[in-house]
Amino acid sequence: MKTRITRIVPAAGRAPALAALLVALAVCAGDAVATTFPFGHHRRSVNDLGNQFLPFHARLWDLLHGRADGGLLLNWQSGFGTSFLPDLGTYLTSPFAPLVALFPRGDLDGALYVVTILKMAAAAAAMAFVLPRLRPAADARMWWGAGLLGAAYGLCGWAILEAVYNPMWLDGLIAFPLLCLVGVWVREGRRPLLGPLVVAVCWIANFYTAYMATLGAALVLIVTVRRWRVVLRGAVTVLLGVGLAAPLLVPLFLGTRYAYPGVVRDFVPAGGADLAARLMPATYGFSTPALFVATAVPVLAASLLFRRQWLWPCVVAGVALSFQFTPTHLVWHIFATPNGSPYRQTFVLTGVMVIAAWTAIADGLPGPRPLLGGAGLVAVLGLFALGSGEATPVGWALFGAGLVAVLLVASSRRGAVLVLAGVLVAQAAATTAWGDKERLARLDDYPAWSAADTRKAAALAKADGWPAYRTDSGRPQVTGNEPMYIGGQGGSYYSSLTPDVLTHTMAALGVGWTSRGRNLQSLDNPVTDALFAVGARWRDGKVVRTAQPLPLLTVRRPGPAPVYGPSPFRNQELLLGARVYEPPAADGACRLGTEVFFWSPDYTGKVRFGDRTVKMRGQLLKWRATLTSLGVQKVPGLRPELPAKGELACLDHTRLRKAVDALRALAPTSIHVTDTGVRATLRPGTTGTVVLSAPRIPGWTCDGRPASSYGGLVATEVTSGQREVGCSFRPPGLKAGLGGGGAAALLLALWVALDVRRRRRGPAAPDAPELPARTLVAANRERGGTA
C-alpha cells in the first residue's frame, strides 16, 4: 500500500539565495587568487571570448544606444554587410545580454564578467529552487541541502572551466533546472501557459545548449513519472515552446546551412583514466569532459546504491556512458561533432548527478554506512586517475579533502553545513584559478579595452563617412571582429555563421583568414578599397584617406558576370572591369611608380623588399596569408626576396584612377541606405547591371525579385527607362519562422482553453511523487538518518 504526503517546500528564497551567494564567492575568489581580470593583471578574454563574443556584445551595446550601422536584420559593419539575426540568436538573445548597456562601452570586459557571474548564480539558484519540487523534502530544515547542491551545480567544472569563456552556453546551465521545473508543472498538470513560455525563453536564449538541456529534462521527467500521458503532455509543451521561438530559430538554422563549412571531425572518446581525473578539482583538458562537481555530490549519488536505491545511480551511469559512444554523442550535439570541445553536454550529467544527490538527502542525511560506501566507491573511481596526466597534485589534495569532509559529516552531523560549504567553495575557487592559468597558457588571449583603443575608435569615428563611403579599421587587428569592437564598416568578420559566399568571394580577391575560413581579415588593397567603397582606413597607427572610392552602388555595362580563376589579381580586375595590374619584368622587378603586391596564401615567413619587411602567415586550411603590398617601386631593378611559391603583380595607380572614374560616371545620382537595404536613383538611360558592394548572401531581393550575383556581390539587371532600383535584405526563414511562431501561439491558446475547460469539470489528481507507507520518522530511524 502506498500513500501520498504533503509537499514540504523550504522557506521561499533561502536555498536559492545561499546557492547564488556561494557561486559568486567561489568564482570571484578563484579569479582573485589567479590575479585575473578584474582582480589582477592577467587577461580574462581568451579564445572566442575576446575574439568573438565581446565584439558581438559591443554591437549589442551600439544597437541599444542607437549607434550601430544597420539593425537587427542586417549588419553593415562587418564583412561589408552580413546577416545579423542569426548572429543575434547565437550570441546575444540571452535575457542577461542587454545588461551590458548599463556599463560604459569602454568597460564591456567588466560588463561581460558581471553578466557571467549573474548567469552562474542564476543557474545555481534555479537548481536550488527546483530540487525540492522534483522531490519534496521530509523536513523544511533541509533547505540548506538544496542550497549547497544548487551551488555545486552552478560551480561545476563545465561552468567554471568551459562555459565561463563561452558565456552564451551558461544559458543552457540555467535552462536545465528551469526545464525540469516545467516537467514538474507537466507532472502536476499545472501552468499550461507558463510552461511553453519558459521553454521558448530557454531556446531563444541559446538554442544549442537548450537542446541539450531539453534532452536532460525529458529524461528526468520520464524517470520521475513513467506515465506515457504525462510524457506526451511534456512533449507537447516543448513543441509549443520551440514553436514560439521559431521566428528566431528558423533563420538561425538556415544561417548555419549557408555558413562556410567548419572542419569536420571524427569523435574520439576520452580514456577512462582521463575521465576519472576530470572528476577532480583543479584539472583542465580541452578534449575531455569537465566532470568536476563538489566531491560530496558524487558521494551522495553513490550512497543510494548502499540503500538499495538503484534508479538514479543507473540514470547517472547511463548519461555518462552516452557521452562515450558516437551515435549518442551525435544525438547530444544535434548530429554534428563540434569543432571544439566534444563534451559540451557535460552540464546535463552534472545536473542529473545533483538531482541524484538531492534524492539521497531529501529524507534527511544518509547514515554513516551509506556515506562510507559512497565515499569508498568514489575513492575507487579516483584511483583510476593514476593513469592520467591530467590529474594534478592540487586536484588530488582537494579531492581527498572532499572525501574527508563527507566522512566527518558521517561521523558527526554537527557543523555539516559549514564543513560542506567550506570544501565546496575551496574546491571551486581552486578550480577556477587553475582554469584561469591553464587557459592563458593554452589559448590565444586578447587585451582589455585600452587608451589606445579609445584613441583609435575616436579617430575612426571622426573619419566616418557612412554611407557615402566605408571606413575600415585595418590591420593589425585586436580581434576578428574589429569593426564591431572598434568602429567602421570594414571587411573583417568572425562568426560561426560566416556566409559561405562571403568567404569564397573574399578569398578569390586575396583576403587572408584564420579559423579555417570563418575569421576573415581586413584586406588593405587599393583595388578592393575602390570596389567596396572604402574611403578611409587605419594604417600604421593613424587613419589615412584612400584613393577616391566608388559609391556603394555602381553600374556595369551589359555583359556576363565575372568568373573567378586562381589569381586574385586577375579576379580583382574582372570585378573592376579593367586591367590595372601588370606582371613584373623578366628580371622580376616592377616598373617604376607601380605598387608591388605579393600573394602566397600558404606561406609563413618574411618577405623583404628594399628596406621594408612584411610578415606573412599561411598554413592552409587553418590560416590563409593575405595578399600583401610590399611598397612602391622606387629603385630601378630592385627585386623583392620572395619564397619559391607565389605570385607577384605591379599595380598601376593611374589605370586604377581611370577605371574608377569610368564607373563613377555611370553611378546612380543618389543613394539612400537603410537598416535593411538600399535605394538609388539611376541616371537617365542606364542599362546593364547594378552592383551593390555587399556579398550576395541568401536573403537579398532587388525590385521584388531575388538578387543575382556579380562576382559574389549583390546585383540586379536594369533596363532603359528605369529610374530607380531598390535592394532589401530579409534573412531566409524569417517569414516561415513568423508563421510558425504565430501557429504555435494559436495552438497554445487552444491548449490553454482546453485546460481551463478541463479544470472547470474538475481537476485530476496530480502525479505527485510517492513514498513508502511507513512514516518518515520510522524510515529515517531505520536508515540511521536525521529528520
Image: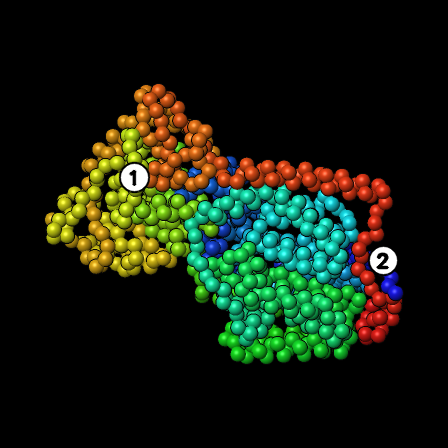
Find the residue positioned furthest to the front.
228
- Position of residue 544 relative to residue 311, above or below, is above
> Amino acid under label 2?
Thr
Element at badge 1?
Answer: loop
Which of 166 and 497 lies nearest the eye of the viewer? 497
Identify the residue under disc 2: 6
Residue 340 on image: x %, y %: 48, 60
Residue at x 62%, y 46% (from the top left corner): 242
Residues at marks 2 and 1, CA–CA distance in whole angstroms: 76 Å
> Amino acid under label 1?
Pro
Which of 520 and 258 lies nearest the eye of the viewer? 258
Residue at x 49%, y 36% (from the top left corner): 730
Pick whichever of labels 2 and 1 is earlier in the sequence. 2
Quarter of the image for the C terminus: give it. Answer: bottom right
Residue at x 46%, y 35% (from the top left corner): 729
Residue at x 39%, y 40% (from the top left corner): 695
